[in-house]
Image: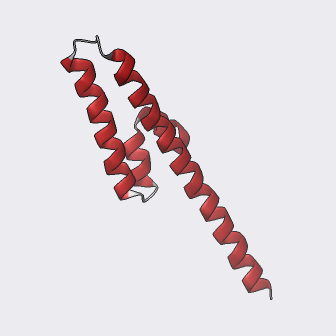
Amino acid sequence: MMYILAIILPPVALLMSGKIIQAIINLVLILLSVTIFVGTLSIGSFISFPLYIISIIHALFAVHGNRTDSKIEAAVDKAINDK
């Protein structure tokens, strides 16, 4: 679910993962992409489209990292409690 949200609305997925600063940076990147696209009347789409793709990739990596961190913390807690 979070991966789909990261593709559709990258800053929202980052906010839901608890990464506020990264969400702000991602939002700035998306706004820059949209501004370039609209400001150049889609002539600058060769710049704006890759910026949007980069924001999606950034969100996917951050969400994946958050899930991995949660799994590692759970494994460590289990190992500590088993002793």
The answer to which quarter of the image holds residue 10 is top left
Q: Which residue corresponds to the image point at 47% horizontal and 43% vertical from the top-left?
A: 59
Front residue of 14/52: it is 52
Placement of 3 over or under 39, stated as above or below:
below
Task: Locate the C terminus by quadrant.
Answer: bottom right
Front residue of 78/22: it is 22
Residue situated furthest left in the rendering: 39
Placement of 44 over or under 50, stated as above or below:
above
Report whether 75 appears left or right of 54.
right
Residue 7 in picture, x, y percent from top left: 48, 34
Residue situated furthest bottom in the rendering: 83
The answer to whether one can see residue 65 in this image is yes
Q: Which residue corresponds to the image point at 36% horizontal and 22% vertical from the top-left?
A: 47
Front residue of 82/20: it is 20
Q: Which residue corresponds to the image point at 39% horizontal and 30% vertical from the top-left?
A: 51
Q: What colouring style does the render use? A: secondary structure
Task: Locate the N terminus by quadrant.
Answer: top right
Residue 26 in picture, x, y percent from top left: 36, 43
Residue 22 in picture, x, y percent from top left: 39, 52
Q: What is the total number of numbered labels drawn onto the structure image? A: 0
Report whether 44 appears left or right of 39.
right
Placement of 27 over or under 53, stated as above or below:
below
The answer to whether one can see residue 1 in this image is no
The answer to which quarter of the image holds residue 67 is bottom right
Q: Which residue corresponds to the image point at 27% horizontal and 20% vertical from the top-left?
A: 37
Residue 55 in picture, x, y percent from top left: 42, 37
